[in-house]
Image (cartoon, helix red, strand yellow):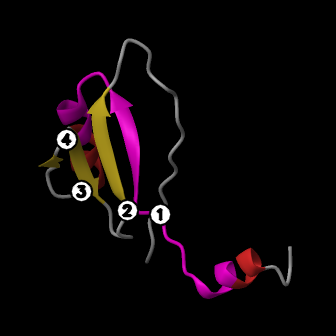
C-alpha cells in the first residue's frame, strides 16, 4: 500500500538475490558440471553445500536431495555481447 510504513521502507532498501539452493542426487558432481559448463571456478565446499559463484554475486548452493527431486527453473542470460 502506497504511503504505508512497509512501502516507504521498501522504496529505500535495495534487494538482491544472494543464493538459491539446488537439490541434487550428487551435489558435488552436479555443481562441478554446471561450473564447467558456465566457465566458472570449481565449486567450493560451504557446510553441507557445494557453492557455484556467479558474476552477479548470486550463489547456487548444491545440496543432497532426498529420494524426490524438486524441479526448478533457472534461466541465465549472457551479458555484454
Q: CA distance from mark 1 to mark 2?
A: 6 Å
Please report the residue visible at 43 percent of the width from the left and 77 percent of the height from the top.
Answer: 80
Corner quadrant of residue 33: top left
| Residue 14 position within the rendered picture, expressed as x and y whole percent measured from the top left | 55, 80
In this rendered view, identify the residue nearer to me: 8 or 60: 8
Q: CA distance from mark 3 to mark 4?
A: 10 Å
Q: CA distance from mark 4 to mark 1?
A: 22 Å
Q: Which mark is residue 17?
A: 1
Q: CA distance from mark 2 to mark 3?
A: 15 Å
Q: Earlier in the sequence, mark 4 or mark 2?
A: 4
Quarter of the image for the C terminus: give it.
bottom left
Magenta-tinted stretch: 9-31
Please report the residue visible at 24 percent of the width from the left and 49 percent of the height from the top.
Answer: 51
Please report the residue visible at 19 percent of the width from the left and 32 percent of the height from the top.
Answer: 29
Labelled pair 2, 3 in contact (Cβ < 8 Å)? no
| Residue 13 position within the rendered picture, expressed as x and y whole percent measured from the top left | 57, 82
| Residue 69 position within the rendered picture, expressed as x and y whole percent measured from the top left | 44, 21
On the image, numbered disc 4 is attached to which residue?
Answer: 32
Quarter of the image for the N terminus: give it.
bottom right
Labelled pair 1, 2 in contact (Cβ < 8 Å)? yes
On the image, numbered disc 3 is attached to which residue?
Answer: 39
Labelled pair 3, 1 in contact (Cβ < 8 Å)? no
On the image, numbered disc 2 is attached to which residue?
Answer: 58
Q: How many residues crowd around disc 2 within 10 Å: few (fewer than 14), some, or many (20 or more)?
A: some
Q: Is residue 75 left or right of residue 10?
A: left
* Count of marks, rendered view: 4
| Residue 44 position within the rendered picture, expressed as x and y whole percent measured from the top left | 14, 51
- Which type of secondary structure does the marked residue at label 4 adopt? helix
Labelled pair 4, 2 in contact (Cβ < 8 Å)? no
Q: Earlier in the sequence, mark 4 or mark 1?
A: 1
Amino acid at each position: 500500500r502506497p504511503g504505508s510504513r512497509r512501502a516507504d521502507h521498501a522504496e529505500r532498501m535495495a534487494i538482491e538475490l544472494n543464493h538459491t539452493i539446488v537439490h541434487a542426487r550428487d551435489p558435488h558432481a552436479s555443481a562441478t558440471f554446471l561450473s564447467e559448463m558456465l566457465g566458472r571456478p570449481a565449486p567450493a565446499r560451504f557446510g553441507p553445500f557445494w557453492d557455484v559463484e556467479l558474476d552477479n554475486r548470486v550463489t547456487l548452493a548444491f545440496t543432497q536431495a532426498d529420494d524426490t527431486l524438486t524441479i526448478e527453473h533457472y534461466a541465465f542470460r549472457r551479458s555484454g555481447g
